[in-house]
């Protein structure tokens, strides 16, 4: 990708042969958490308004989430649409937990909690002797703290956007570290064409932008609280009326944990019954489920013509071809 560097940072680098730099990583995890880390020796805070930085003030941690580092960003000067790639490594210390959960960082890697995470990579530049000062400052209110705007000199530095992409593969994981392969958005062009096949069932995921059921996905989503008897395989809700009283309504639906040990994680509902066990999971939850944990759950869809029509009244957006002959008949 094209590197993004502000004019003030370019000027700083042209006039300073010696400088300090560090890489920053913002990793947006599938659980909704964001991991902000640096390969620097100390935590680095990037203030709002820093040249090359468009977000709010954020602190990137050097050791709180382990030691993170990257390899070279590969790039080809060719006419092909080959994606750029970058290796990423984490070496967590003992006791370092995955953000928002009570499991270790490497356990999170093994259980797929970094799969398809998006990330930004930045490089920050700083003056010699001013490690951590990643900004361009003329009037130093931050040091005086009284808002007087006393002139303290001009500090140069800034942020260069180095890479944006997705974690596409875990290349290695062992007891002490994990290695990832990251690719920029060009890797999405590797998808098969045509993307849609002529098939009987619908190609959309229920509730997504293509499906767009009447009233939106929220019209078919409920919140539930786990009652006693719930575990990692079974969720028994405290309230069993309404849509919970219709057997199969949430079969093949998605249930997301809102509070509790599994907050941010999702599972597929294997079966929805009208008596205990009410909701059986396709795969067990990563951590124990206890009474009082809350969840949101969207209705299940088997992607057939009849379900789309009778259950959701959404034939307008049905993408399947229900009257196409089966392959054996075509042959």
Image (tube, rainbow, N blue to C red):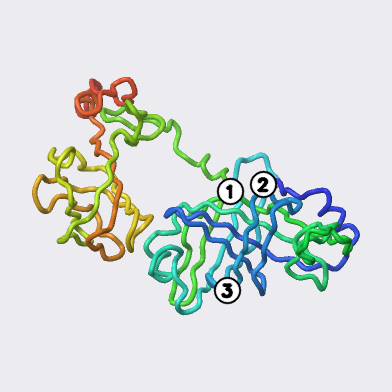
Mark toward the viewer: 1 or 3: 3
Which residue ends up furthest to the right in the rendered image?
Answer: 15
Label for residue 63? 3
Q: Residue at x 33, y 60 (%)?
A: 262
- Choose the circle earlier in sequence order: 1 or 3: 3
Q: CA distance from mark 1 to mark 2?
A: 7 Å
Q: Quadrant of residue 23?
A: bottom right
Q: Is residue 10 left or right of residue 70?
A: right
Q: CA distance from mark 1 to mark 3?
A: 26 Å
Q: Residue at x 61, y 67 (%)?
A: 69
The reply to whether dot 1 and dot 3 touch (C-beta < 8 Å) is no
The reply to whether dot 2 and dot 3 touch (C-beta < 8 Å) is no
SS category of the residue bearing label 2: loop
Residue denoted by label 1: 184
The reply to whether dot 1 and dot 2 touch (C-beta < 8 Å) is yes
Picture quarter with the C terminus? top left
Q: Residue at x 62, y 66 (%)?
A: 38
- Looking at the image, which is closer to me, 283 or 73? 283
Q: Quadrant of residue 222?
A: top left
Residue 247 % position (x, y): 12, 40
Residue denoted by label 2: 1
Can see residue 330?
no
Q: CA distance from mark 2 to mark 3?
A: 29 Å
């Amino acid at each position: 990708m094209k590197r993004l560097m502000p004019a003030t940072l370019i000027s700083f680098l042209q006039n300073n042969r010696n400088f300090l730099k560090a890489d920053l990583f913002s990793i947006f995890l599938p659980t909704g958490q964001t991991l902000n880390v640096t390969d620097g020796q100390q935590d680095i805070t990037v203030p709002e308004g820093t040249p090359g930085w468009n977000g709010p003030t954020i602190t990137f941690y050097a050791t709180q989430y382990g030691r993170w580092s990257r390899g070279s960003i590969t790039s080809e000067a060719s006419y092909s649409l080959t994606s750029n790639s970058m290796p990423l490594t984490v070496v967590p210390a003992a006791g370092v937990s995955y953000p928002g959960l009570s499991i270790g960082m490497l356990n999170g890697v093994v259980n797929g909690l970094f799969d398809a995470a998006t990330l930004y990579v930045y490089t920050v530049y700083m003056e010699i002797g001013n490690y951590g000062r990643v900004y361009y400052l003329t009037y130093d209110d931050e040091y005086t703290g009284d808002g007087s705007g006393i002139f303290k000199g001009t500090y140069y530095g800034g942020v260069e956007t180095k890479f944006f992409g997705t974690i596409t593969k875990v290349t290695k994981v062992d007891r002490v570290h994990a290695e990832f392969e990251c690719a920029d958005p060009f890797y999405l062009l590797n998808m098969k064409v045509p993307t849609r096949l002529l098939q009987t069932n619908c190609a959309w995921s229920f509730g997504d932008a293509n499906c767009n059921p009447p009233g939106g996905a929220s019209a078919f989503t409920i919140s539930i609280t786990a009652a006693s008897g719930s575990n990692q395989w079974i969720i028994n809700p405290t309230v069993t009326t309404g849509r919970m009283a219709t057997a199969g309504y949430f079969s093949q639906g998605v249930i997301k944990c809102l509070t509790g040990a599994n907050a941010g994680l999702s599972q597929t509902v294997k079966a929805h019954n009208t008596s205990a066990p009410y909701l059986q999971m396709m795969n067990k939850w990563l951590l124990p489920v206890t009474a009082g944990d809350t969840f949101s759950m969207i209705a299940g869809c088997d992607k057939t013509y009849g379900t789309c029509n009778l259950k959701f009244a959404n034939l307008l957006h049905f993408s399947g071809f229900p009257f196409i002959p089966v392959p054996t008949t075509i042959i």
